[in-house]
Amino acid sequence: MTWLTDFWRSSIGGKVTMAVTGVLLFGFVVAHLLGNLLLLAGPDAINSYAKWLHDKGPLLWVARIGLIAIFLLHIVTAIRLSRANKVARPVAYAKEATMQASMASRSMLWSGLSLLVFVVYHLLHFTFGVTNAEHFAKKAAPSTAAWNGHDVHAMVVASFQVPVIAIAYAAFQLVLFLHLLHGLQSFAQTLGVHHARYTPMIKKLSVLLAAAIAGGNVLLALSVLLGLVKGAA
Amino acid sequence: MRISLHIWRQSKKSTKANFKQDGKMVRYQLDHVSPDMSFLEMLDVLNEQLTKKGEEPVAFDHDCREGVCGSCGVMIDGEAHGPESGTTTCQLHMRSFRDGAEIWVEPWRAAAFPVVKDLVVDRSAFDRVVQSGAFISVNTGAPQDANAIPVPKADADRAFDAATCIGCGACVAACKNASAMLFVGAKVSHFLHLPQGRVEREQRARHLVAAMDQEGFGNCTNQNECEAACPKEIPVRVIAEMNREFVRAKVRQEPVSSKRVGGDG
Ligand code: HEM
Ligand code: SF4
Ligand code: FES
């Protein structure tokens, strides 16, 4: 155990923790998007997907608790490292200059903390049904496969038909894009992957993946807002 | 050329308690600067004027003045060693600035490098890191035939890239997190690619990283500012190598047991 905590406390151990938890969170974000793209395939598709997930019972809880633990570890380590970095530079330069650090790389703590705020809102919205209880309460027809009769499709469509909600979700994807943009290429370097040929490819791939994730989420919100995905009549 | 300088003046050594209030930026003006002067020669001219006026000259570190010793680094307009890439402050010339320029000159800023006076910082943290393991601990005797141990060209080049580090501290100064990972990575990489160095690779990685953390340097966030600032253009590849070496060394570390005598921690 002390071996593990010593590792975590070291500078590189902290970085590796960020990279491993970060990439697991990335994996979640990918799975989350793929599942939600079923929204485009109609009410039955996404409702039976929701039912399938909930039918997993204890397994779903293992996944949820694991995800929360990973998320917390990512945040706690981020805060520890960021504080140590502030302490390491006690006096700022009177004249600051940046030579090649990207904007995304310099705003990781802020994009990350904004993600945290967004995740809390997102859970209150779609998981706990607190912020828009009337959308959460929508019921599917008894004949269709849906978890507890809960109509995920109708809930999401009703929410994203509200322009403020859809636009806020879409705009927020820019923050996720920035975090993943630096996060994905950083991940490779932190875990020791650096190569004259592959590193430039990894950087391009980071842009592509970050854009695909953010773009996919934007697509979902906007396709409802623009009326391409409609609720049941 | 006419040059205006804003220079950090500080008379007492910084300590943890007084890091912030110990000095201030002071403006000076030089009216006859030759574009062929080096940056340090320009400071020499300033110091002559200050001495004539009975003022305290500006303290700055320098030794070789030919870009090999690593002592002359200062922050110039927010850039370590100034605006030219791959160039130390002593090799920077005033022709890199325009006539009438206002130039800001500050010491390296890092908790691990306390300011001693004006632009001079104490970089002994680097020495302690090196003493913790950036060497080969067996006596290798007299030089043997150069080709007795074959080293592939690619490996020799990688080791040499890292070995060109002059320990100037620009990487720490330029890093937004005051991280020393380019410097320490250079030490790891320097030995990693050579057969003599590979023998102690695990304990070296553990000891260097522990010493680096002990000195209070920050943590790399892969922004690569160090690489842009390094006068020897050491690539961030060495940081990836250090990360890999450290994880490998930690994974292979044996628990300290009563049966095992010694052990390197
Ligand atoms: C959807 C949630 C999130 C995902 C997918 C994610 C993903 C990532 C990835 C892949 C990395 C790269 C790791 C590395 O440097 O090697 C990273 C780094 C980081 N994340 Fe997150 N993260 C998320 C949430 C957060 C949150 C809530 C915070 C709040 C503090 C945060 C703060 C950071 C910081 C400070 C770094 C280090 C940046 C650096 O080294 O430059 N992240 N994240
Ligand atoms: S790595 Fe480069 S910037 Fe850092 S101490 Fe060595 S020579 Fe100076
Ligand atoms: S004085 Fe030696 S490197 Fe500049």
Image (cartoon, coloured by chain):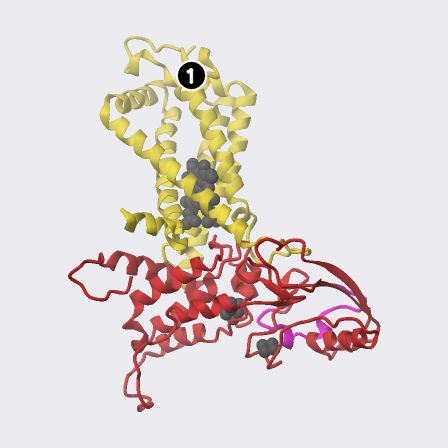
Q: Residue at x 39, y 71 (%)?
A: B134
Q: Quadrant of ligand 3?
A: bottom right
Total count of labels: 1
Beta carbon at label 1 within 8 Å of ligand 1: no
Quarter-of-image position of residue B39: bottom right
Q: Is residue B189 above or below residue A179?
A: below
Locate residue A91 relative to residue B42 in the image: left or right.
left
Residue B87 at x, y percent in the picture = 60, 73
Q: Which residues are magenta?
A: B85-102
Q: Residue at x 31, y 91 (%)?
A: B145
Please tell me whether residue A46 belongs to the stretch shown in magenta: no
The hue in which chain B appears in the rendered picture of the protein: red
Residue B239 at x, y percent in the picture = 42, 62
Q: Is residue A219 visible?
A: no
Q: Disc 1: which chain? A: A
Residue B148 at x, y percent in the picture = 28, 87
Residue placed under numbered mark 1 in the picture: A129
Locate residue A130 relative to residue A192 in the image: left or right.
right
Q: Quadrant of the C terminus of chain A?
A: top left
B4 or B137, nearer to the observer: B137
Predominant SS of the magenta segment: loop
B144 or B211, nearer to the observer: B211
Q: Secondary structure at mark 1?
A: loop
Residue B149 at x, y percent in the picture = 28, 84
Identified by mark 1, the residue type is: Gly
Locate residue B85 relative to residue A74 in the image: left or right.
right
The hue in which chain A appears in the rendered picture of the protein: yellow
Q: Is residue B237 visible?
A: yes
B260 or A142, nearer to the observer: B260
Quarter-of-image position of residue A127: top left
Q: Residue at x 45, y 16 (%)?
A: A130
